[in-house]
Structures are given as structure tokens and as C-alpha cells.
């Protein structure tokens, strides 16, 4: 009647738009805390768990459906790409700070102090593991799977596929506020360009992990000064 | 029967179902009289007796619509049920994740626009959901789950698969079944917040349900998806209305900025 594979591909895309929102389900089971520390703890474990579960299910469905994108199977890149990924990871931190500051600068505000969002007020090993795991799952989902399906399977031109994947990635951050959505849409587009230029998900993955490690280091420094 | 005629037939059938279902709810004094009469006959409490009656009416009318539409579209049981495979369980799991996360994303956006809104309380005050609070604990998830099974058989089964069987394209069949389903959810509520929550969950369930049915070739995974979704969220909302733990977030799940 209709193309089953096409519907399965669209289902994978629709089901992976906002995995982090599944943390709300955990709060409905009574894990919600009243203090900021418990809320942060729920996010530290809940967000990577939600991303990992959705990512694993989506990749498994794509594999059993026979439409696993080529980007996900290409894991070998040159040393230059590794260096490029690390540099890009540091650069997007500056880019996100710039985008975060832009609305204030445009309103004429001066003397801004930039900071990292830290609900618990500190950076520990669990926090670092959480943001690294989340970053890896996000790259597999929004770059490897999304751009792969949109371009390789649905025939979307690369710029449109990169933008659509960046928007989906940004939408998953809606609970952080619209500023963060704009930051993530831009970063997502940068990671998308890294994916299609290198042909492998490893490059945006390394860049994203670098970005999250730099943000964690800045957060630790910020917490130590406070 | 051509596709436009079948679309019209679906609209008339579902509109009749909801109109007949709303009839006993429409007038408070009629509702009270009927509840007392049912309580007298059954020996149970008036509110519980009326809730059981309303549920039976909703399910019975829904099944009548299902049979009428299935007959009009010449739908066989085999066409509806298909032959699900083990890998469809994985697809169902992904669909469960997707429906929940998309639905909560819509509610997150509502909280962002109106931070003081009480979503679980609003859901619990929807008349048919409020009525099931009078039932024993175990039936509180069974009623929405049963309603979900019938709704899935009608909207994703008779309407969506039926339109496909009549030669309709996926986009048309998905749009028609999702629109009728969502409007059907919205006419049973009484406030804008209830309309937003039920409307967005209707759109989410409709879209994901249609994709799931078309991807697996069976309505059974969509039936499980809708029943578990409805049973879980209704229980959470009514639990919250009684002072328990609810789905309402206290704020963004911070701490995962990257």
C-alpha cells in the first residue's frame, strides 16, 4: 500500500526529535526532587540515559530496516581531521558564548560576564561523564542518523539536510530557553558541515566531546572561583 | 467507494459517535438523574455507575463506528492486523519514546509560555477523566487504555488503513485520520489548556501512530502504543490531582547544558 521503509525512516526522524524530554517521565515516577541539587542529579543521569536509550533504539531500527546511513559505518579518519575536530570543538564554545552575549550587546549592555549553566554549582566526574555521553549520542542521532537519512535516503540536498538536523538538535534544548536553542542550531550546523566534509561521524563526535570537555573545564573553574 | 466519499463517511460516523456520547453528559440534571437510576439498578455509587456507563457507551459506539467503516471500506481483519514480526517490537519501543518525548516537548513549550499553568490538574479536570476518579484504582488506567484500543481501531484502523485500501495516499490518509482524531479529543474538553494538551497529544499520537501502522503493516503496535500512553498519562494526572507525584516539571532539568 505505502512504502514501509520510507515510513520507518520518517518514524525514526519523528521519534528522535527531543529525547531529553523523556526525563519528565522519570519525574512522574516520583524521582523529582524539590531542591536544585536533586533536580541537577536527575538531569545528570536522566538526560544521557534518555539520549542513549533513544539513540540505541533508533540505530537498531535503522539497522534492522536496512537503511543505516553510511556516515555511521565510516569510523576511520586522518590525523588532520582529528586536529580539525578538536579545534572546531574549542571554536564552537567561543561561538556559543558570542551568540549568548549578542542579544545583550545589541541592547547596548557592556561589561558582560560569561558563565556556564551549572545547576548543582559544581563539576564532578558524573557531570563530565554525563555531558560526554550525551554529546556522543547527539552526534550519532542528529548528524549520523538524521543527515544520513535525510540526504542518503530521502534525497534532500546536503545544506537542507544539515539545517533540518540542526533544527531538530536545537529543538531538543527548548527547556534551556530560546537563547540556547539559537546557540545549538548554529553549533549543529557547524557539526553538520564537519560530518559531510569528512564523510564520517567521528569528526563531529570528537568536536562535540571536545566542546563539552572545554565547557566542563570552564564550569569547574567558575565553580572554584565562586 | 471513492476516497472523498469515504472521507465524508468517516467524518459523519465519528461526529455521530461523539454526539451520541456527549448526549448523557450535556445536561447536569439529566446526568444526575441517569446516575441515580444506574446506581439504583446496579447497587453501586451513582458516580461510579455513571462512569462505567459512560465508558461502555463510548466503547460500544466506537465499535459500531469501526464495523460500519470497515464494512464500507471492505476491510478484512487480516488487512488491519497484518503479520507483525519480532523486529516490530523494537519499532514500537522507538515509537513509545518518540510519542512521549514529543508530547512532553509540547507541554514544555506551554510551560515556557505560561509558567504557572497546572497541566496535570487541567487534564484531571477533563470531564471524562474526572469521572474515572470515582472508579477503583486498578480501573483508572484500564478505562483510558480500553478507550485507546477502540480509538486506535477506528482512527488508525478503519480511517487510516481504510483510506489506504480505497487508494488514498499516505499524506492524505494520515492528515484525515489525525485531524478527525484530534478534533474528537478537543471537543471533549472545556478549557484552552486542556484543548492544547489534548490537541498536541492527538497530533503526536496521530502522526507517530500512522507512521507505525504503515511501517509495520499492522495496527497492533499502534494499539499498544496508544493504550500504554493513555493509561500512563491519565494515571499520572489523576494521581497528581489527588496530591501525588505528577508530571509537572519544577523547572528545566538543568545541569546538562552541553
Image (spheres, coloured by chain):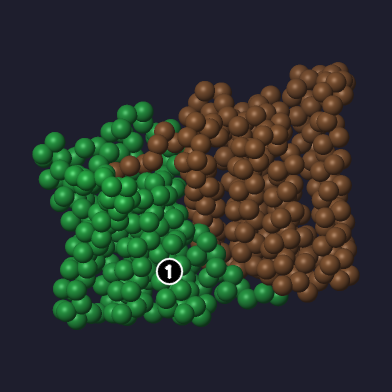
Question: Residue B63 at what x, y percent from top left?
Answer: 82, 49
Question: Residue B99 at what x, y percent from top left?
Answer: 55, 53
Give the number of callouts: 1
User: Is residue B135 visible to us here?
Assistant: no
| Location of residue B5 (image quadrant) | bottom right
Q: Secondary structure at mark 1?
A: helix
- Residue at position x 57%, y 26% in the image: B241
- Residue at position x 85%, y 21% in the image: B29
User: Is residue B140 visible to us here?
Assistant: yes
The residue that mark 1 highlights is: A163
| Location of residue B168 (image quadrant) | bottom right
- Compared across the picture, whether B249 is left or right of A139 comes to right
Residue A222 vertical placement versus B88 (above, below): above
- Residue at position x 61%, y 48% in the image: B200
| Location of residue A206 (image quadrant) | bottom left
Residue B226 vertical placement versus A185 (above, below): above
- Compared across the picture, whether B212 is left or right of A219 comes to right
- Compared across the picture, whether B173 is left or right of B118 comes to right
- Residue at position x 33%, y 42% in the image: B254
User: Camera-side residue: A94 or A204?
Assistant: A94
Question: Residue B183 at what x, y percent from top left?
Answer: 73, 48
Identify by letter the chain in green.
A
Identify by letter the chain in brown.
B
Q: Residue furthest front?
A: A108
Question: Residue A198 at what x, y percent from top left?
Answer: 28, 79
Quadrant of the image containing the N terminus of chain B:
bottom right
To which chain does the residue with label 1 belong? A
- Compared across the picture, whether B233 is left or right of A77 comes to right
- Mark 1: few/some/many CA within 10 Å (<14, 14-19, 20+): some
Amino acid at each position: 500500500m505505502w512504502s514501509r521503509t520510507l515510513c520507518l525512516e520518517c518514524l525514526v526522524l519523528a521519534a528522535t526529535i527531543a529525547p531529553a524530554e523523556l526525563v519528565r517521565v522519570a519525574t512522574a515516577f516520583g524521582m523529582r526532587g524539590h531542591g536544585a541539587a536533586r533536580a541537577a542529579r536527575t538531569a545528570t543521569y536522566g538526560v544521557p540515559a534518555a539520549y542513549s536509550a533513544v539513540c540505541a533504539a533508533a540505530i537498531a531500527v535503522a539497522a534492522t530496516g536496512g537503511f543505516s546511513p553510511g556516515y555511521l559505518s565510516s569510523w576511520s579518519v586522518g590525523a588532520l581531521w582529528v586536529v580539525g575536530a578538536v579545534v572546531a570543538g574549542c571554536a564552537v564554545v567561543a561561538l556559543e558564548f558570542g551568540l549568548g552575549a549578542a542579544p545583550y550587546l545589541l541592547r547596548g549592555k557592556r561589561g558582560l560576564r560569561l558563565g556556564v549553566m551549572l545547576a548543582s554549582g559544581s563539576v564532578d566526574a558524573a557531570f563530565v561523564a554525563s555531558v560526554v555521553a550525551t554529546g556522543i549520542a547527539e552526534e550519532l542521532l542528529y548528524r549520523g542518523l538524521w543527515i544520513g537519512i535525510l540526504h542518503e535516503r530521502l534525497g534532500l540536498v546536503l545544506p537542507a539536510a544539515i539545517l533540518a538536523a540542526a533544527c531538530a538538535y536545537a529543538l531538543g534544548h527548548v527547556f534551556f530557553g530560546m537563547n540556547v536553542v539559537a546557540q545549538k542550531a548554529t553549533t549543529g550546523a557547524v557539526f553538520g558541515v564537519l560530518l559531510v566534509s569528512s564523510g564520517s561521524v567521528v569528526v563531529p563526535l570528537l568536536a562535540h566531546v571536545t566542546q563539552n570537555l572545554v565547557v566542563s573545564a570552564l564550569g569547574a573553574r567558575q565553580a572554584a572561583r565562586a | 467507494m471513492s476516497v472523498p466519499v469515504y472521507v465524508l463517511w468517516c467524518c459523519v460516523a465519528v461526529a455521530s459517535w461523539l454526539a451520541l456520547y456527549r448526549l448523557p453528559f450535556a445536561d447536569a440534571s439529566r446526568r444526575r438523574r441517569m446516575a441515580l437510576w444506574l446506581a439504583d439498578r446496579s447497587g453501586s455509587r451513582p458516580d461510579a455507575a455513571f462512569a462505567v456507563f459512560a465508558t461502555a457507551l463510548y466503547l460500544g459506539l466506537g465499535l459500531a463506528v469501526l464495523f460500519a467503516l470497515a464494512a464500507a471500506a471492505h476491510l478484512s481483519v487480516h488487512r488491519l492486523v497484518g503479520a507483525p514480526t519480532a523486529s516490530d517490537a523494537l519499532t514500537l519501543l522507538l515509537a513509545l519514546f518518540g510519542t512521549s518525548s514529543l508530547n512532553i516537548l509540547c507541554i514544555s513549550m506551554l510551560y515556557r509560555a505560561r509558567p504557572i499553568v497546572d497541566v496535570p490538574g487541567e487534564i484531571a479536570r477533563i470531564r471524562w477523566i474526572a469521572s474515572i476518579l470515582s472508579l477503583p484504582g486498578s480501573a483508572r488506567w484500564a478505562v483510558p487504555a480500553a478507550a485507546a484500543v477502540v480509538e486506535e481501531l477506528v482512527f488508525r484502523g478503519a480511517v487510516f488503513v481504510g483510506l489506504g485500501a480505497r487508494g488514498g495516499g499516505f499524506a492524505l490518509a494520515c492528515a484525515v485520520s489525525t485531524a478527525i482524531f484530534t478534533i474528537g479529543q478537543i471537543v471533549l474538553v472545556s478549557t484552552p489548556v486542556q484543548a492544547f494538551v489534548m490537541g498536541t497529544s492527538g497530533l503526536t499520537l496521530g502522526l507517530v501512530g500512522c507512521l507505525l501502522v504503515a511501517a509495520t503493516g499492522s495496527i497492533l503496535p499502534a494499539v499498544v502504543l496508544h493504550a500504554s500512553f493513555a493509561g500512563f498519562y491519565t494515571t499520572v494526572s489523576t494521581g497528581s490531582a489527588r496530591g501525588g507525584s505528577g508530571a509537572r516539571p519544577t523547572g528545566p532539568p538543568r545541569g546538562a547544558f552541553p
